[in-house]
Amino acid sequence: MTKNNIGVTMRYDSFYNKKEIRNGVDFNLISWIFKLGCIPHLIPNDLRYFKVLNKNKFTGFILSGGNDLNAKKTRTIIENKILNLSKNKDIPVLGICHGMQLMNKLEGGKIKKVKKHVGENHKLINIEKNYPFEVNSYHNFSISSLGKNFKVISRSYDEEIEAIKHNKYNWVGWMWHPERAKKFDRKLIQIAKKLFKVDT
């Protein structure tokens, strides 16, 4: 594999009265990754794929949004394996919504139920100046306590944590969905390019 290959995890989608389970990813997320100058590679929720995952030379991973956290689901097992692979090989990871919650939980953090964070836009209070001032919101859960070595990058005005960064590993988490914006935010593209070491 060449430079800028990004592994992307997928959500579970149910069809036909839940008799058919599919791996899913927003097509706009694929477009957003191409906008970064990267090539997306979809990772199925199948533990057999992890053998392939270890052999490929991904330059980064995105833990995509969708689905609540569930420790028993194959997706969670795969994503935890990816995060542990990231730790061992210093591979950058961006966690989007579900992905941010999961990376925080892996490091000992906790989540809580939250209201008025689905189908809303939020203005942000940013610790780092390169972040946007307003983002979308589609989550029923929020972080109640930070995992080990994480720091807060952004909060909403109702004091919910919206973005985090790990002090030791090359991990960044966003509670919003950059792919769902009507127009892709330039600031977020630049942050992601820096995270994945994409030449600009």
Image (spheres, rainbow, N blue to C red):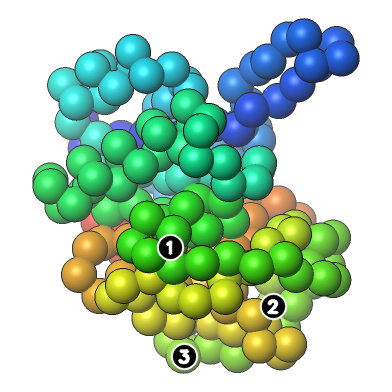
Point 72% across, 59% down: residue: 139
Which residue is label 3 attached to? 127
The residue indicated by pointer 2 is 134
**Which quadrant holds the N terminus?**
top left
Q: Amino acid at mark 2?
A: Glu
Q: Is residue 6 visible?
A: no
Percent of width and height locating residue 87? 19, 52
Residue 121 in sight: yes
Q: Residues within 10 Å of mark 2 (few under 14, many from 20)?
A: few
Residue with the mark numbered 1? 104
Q: Nearer the viewer, residue 26 or 138?
A: 138
Residue at x 29%, y 22% (from the top left corner)? 50
156 relative to 60 in the view: left or right: right
Closer to the observer: label 2 or label 3? 3
The image quadrant where one finds the C terminus is: bottom left
Mark 1 or mark 2: whose residue is earlier in sequence = 1
Q: Position of residue 114 (x, y in %)?
A: 75, 70
Residue at x 47% of width, y 21% of height: 44
Hey, which quadrant is residue 5 in on the image?
A: top left
Which is nearer the N-term, disc 2 or disc 3? 3
Label 3 amino acid? Ile
Q: Amino acid at mark 1?
A: Asn
Q: Nearer the viewer, residue 81 or 73?
A: 73
Give the total number of marks visible in the rendering: 3
**Mark 3 and mark 1 residues within 8 Å of each other at the beta carbon:** no
